[in-house]
Image: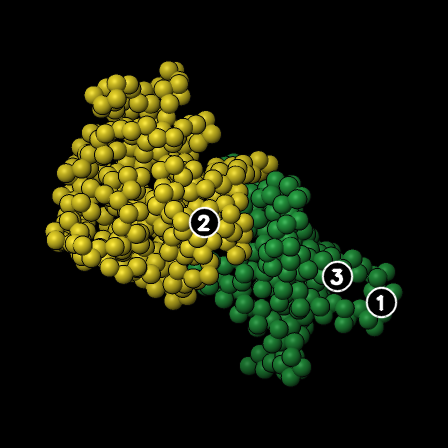
Chain colours: A green, B yellow
Amino acid sequence: MASPRIWLAWRVGVFLAALAPLLFWSWQVANNAAGPEPGRYLLLNLGIGGLWMLLLTLSLTPLTKLTRWKGFALIRRQLGLWTLAYATLHLLSYALFILGLNWALLGSEIVKRPYIIVGMIALVGLAVLGATSNRWAMKRLGKRWKPLHKFSYAILGLVLLHFFWVVRADMQEWAMYAAIAALVMVTRLPPVARALPKLRYRFSSA
Amino acid sequence: MLIKIAKPSDLHESDVTPESIYLSRRRFMGGMAGLGAGLALSGHAQANADYSDVPDGNAPAWLKEKISETQWGAITPSDPKKDKIAPFDDASGYNNFFEFGTDKGDPARHAGSLKTEPWSVVVDGEVNNGGRFALEDFAKPSQFEERIYRLRCVEAWSMVIPWLGIPLADIIKRADPTSKAKYVRFETLVDPEQMRGQRSSFSIIDWPYVEGLRLDEAMNPLTLLAMGMYGRELPNQNGAPLRLVVPWKYGFKSIKSIVRISLTEEQPVNSWQKIAADEYGFYANVNPNVDHPRWSQATERRLPNSLFNPNTIDTLMFNGYADEVAELYAGMNLKENY
């Protein structure tokens, strides 16, 4: 039986682990270790980092079902908010470092490039989920909270589409993320979801 | 090309490098050669870039000798302040060379496995003097020239690179094309053992990487076969030991690690056109008015840049070489022939 203090340490540990990449990339940029185009370096890393956060967030529910370990459920909101933070920084670095805050260019790019539109929709979606992730909003929304937050799967699809449209030559990296995403989504299919706890008994009895 | 005709992209006498620049040994020797050539031909000295902080390579003796005899500063930007040469580390650490991986840092990480010596080049197709040539014999009859060109990537970034090499026209003239020759087709080495990117089963590229030029584009004096950069031989990740440089076209036209040059009657299908014909054409001339379907080509980020200064500049028609090459495309619809 873990004490509340251990759960707190676990949550702080997860917080620091999610923060670490941001510090590391900043350190690289500050030390000229991020290549000749540091803004693009941050942009790409924040995008991929955000996708990782989203995949991790969405894998917590199936992991809980599989293991019944309370720790996974405890960090779900935190990782969801980290996803939003990474995605927001991703957009900010695009506006700041790639466009140089040229708002007119941002406007015309958003209209012309479908991958940017898709990315923006995903980010707005994440912001809505982030804003409704607190206890007050959960109470207010009641039964509607769950279906609303199931939109995170739609957001995952949008993010993968956004990513797909950016890839130029080698699909290996994208295919890897798409495969992980497919796996995560499959675990939410009712028959699979029902089977997960049974799988746990099989593990523990073996 | 020993006769030097002043072009708008050339350096003007008034733009000569500040006198305070430190002369390294290499630069000093190069300076002497350039001075000699400059004095003999046009009566004034050429400015030279400073390569004192560029790491020495490991060039074979014949290549070192050719490089020491280079005509330095044969072509330089008209505004060296605007077109500042990129640091060597950036030019050799930020590359697209999918034979070694798709990340910009992959070529620098993995191209060490490429064996560039000995190297031979096959010249075939519609030529009277074809054959397989050792790189040394291939390069020796021509004078090395240093040419400082803008390199504009199709991904909307650019760098200024000082190349060393010989005009492609020299090689084509020596090959003696037949009357049927209309195009030049180039091929990169295929060797999955040395090139790990060719082992990836997810790659969209059907190896070998292929590029092509129209014969008149290939014969244009700007078109260069490079064997060096920054006063030394090419690093492997930059396409050693032999690569093409076509400064008015997007970077992917400038094929690397060439093993075959064929004169053809039919227009070759270049690799990127084969992959996505709606995004990459045969011509791939730098053109700010024709966007890539997924991003604008009107501007470019001149590298290296920094976080709060993306260093975005306007992209110029034919990458600023319109005076030299625009006539090649007179009357052609460049929106259709992208």
Residue to which mark 3 is pinned: A129
Pinpoint residue B53: horizontal percent, then vertical percent: 36, 28
**Crowding at mark 3 (Cα within 10 Å: few <14, some 14-19, many 20+):** many
Q: How many marks?
A: 3
Dot label at residue A179:
none
Disc 2 and disc 3: Cα gap in Å? 37 Å
Q: Secondary structure at mark 3?
A: helix
The residue under the point 44% across, 59% down is A169
Residue to which mark 1 is pinned: A141
Dot label at residue B154:
2
Tell whether B179 sits left or right of A170: left
**Residue A111: which quarter of the image?**
bottom right
Tell whether B305 sits left or right of B84: right
Mark 1 against mark 2, which lies toward the viewer?
A: 2
**Crowding at mark 1 (Cα within 10 Å: few <14, some 14-19, many 20+):** few
In the image, residue A116 sits, relative to residue B223, either above or below, namely: below
Q: Secondary structure at mark 2?
A: loop
Tell whether B59 sits left or right of B330: left
Q: Chain of mark 2?
A: B
Give the residue type at disc 3. Answer: Leu
Give the residue type at disc 1. Answer: Leu
In the image, residue A25 sits, relative to residue A115, either above or below, namely: above
Image quarter in which the C terminus of chain A is found: bottom right
The residue under the point 44% across, 53% down is B333
